[in-house]
Amino acid sequence: MLNEKVAALINDQVNKELYSSYLYLDFSLYYEEEGLDGFANWYKVQAQEERDHAMLMLRFLQNNGVKPVLEAVAKPDKELNDKLTVLEYGLEHERYVTSLVNNIYDAAYTARDFRTMQFLDWFVKEQGEEEKNAEDLIKKLRLFGDDAKGLYMLNAELAARAYNPPSLVLD
Ligand code: FEO
């Protein structure tokens, strides 16, 4: 059985990850409207990954005797009207999610809940990668985005992103 506080935080994180998925789906819809189908693809794949994160959290609760409780997922509330600002929202959101994962880790550490700490190690690494990806996207758009050919090439690069299931697998 998990520590009650840790379990509650993980349950809350299921919701946060589903919100992340919903937010990135909204980003994807925005870019699709702008004719940037590669950017749209990149965020659609990201939305799938976020849903995977929610499912992993949910499964971890179940595997440890906790019944997950699903709450309402908030409506994405960002004004999306500039292709660079949307990427900056993405980075800001990932940093926020990192802080949430760190909070859960901190609670698990305090409770000497080594099982949860080990589970969260994957998410700590994943957040590092996701922040870097978000930073790289911003850098590239700043470098190439003002030039039509550069933007075309960047869009084509992002169109090639394929979905891969998470490397973490739970029974
Ligand atoms: Fe699942 Fe990018 O947070």
Image: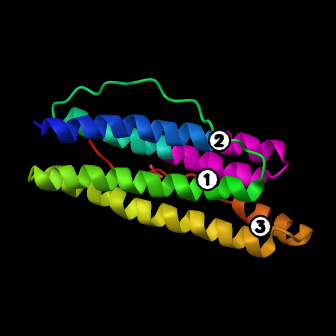
Q: Residue at x 61, y 53 (%)?
A: 89
Using the image, determine if residue 47 lies above or below residue 99.
above
Mark 2 neighbour density, 10 Å: few (under 14) some (14–19) many (20 or more) = few
Per the image, label 2 sits on a secondary structure element best described as loop
Q: Residue at x 37, y 55 (%)?
A: 99
Sooner in the amino-acid sequence: mark 3 or mark 1: 1
In contact (CB < 8 Å): disc 2 and disc 1: yes
Q: Which mark is residue 154?
A: 3
Give the quadrant of the N terminus. top left
Q: Which mark is residue 127?
A: none
Where is residue 19? Give x, y as percent. 50, 37
Q: Is residue 123 left or right of residue 135?
A: left
Q: CA distance from mark 2 to mark 1?
A: 8 Å
**Which of the 4 image quadrants contains residue 14?**
top left
Mark 3 neighbour density, 10 Å: few (under 14) some (14–19) many (20 or more) = some
Q: CA distance from mark 3 to mark 1?
A: 19 Å
Q: CA distance from mark 3 to mark 2?
A: 24 Å
Using the image, determine if residue 57 lies above or below residue 138.
above
Per the image, label 3 sits on a secondary structure element best described as helix
Which amino acid type is marked by label 3? Leu
In contact (CB < 8 Å): disc 3 and disc 1: no
> Which residue is the site of mark 1?
89
> Which residue is the site of mark 2?
78
Residue interval drawn in magenta: 26-49
Indicate yes or no: mark 3 CB to ligand 1 under 8 Å.
Answer: no
Look at the image and tell me whether residue 57 can be seen: yes
Per the image, label 1 sits on a secondary structure element best described as helix
Specify whether residue 167 is painted magenta.
no
Specify whether residue 45 is painted magenta.
yes
Q: Residue at x 78, y 62 (%)?
A: 156
What secondary structure characterizes most of the magenta part? helix
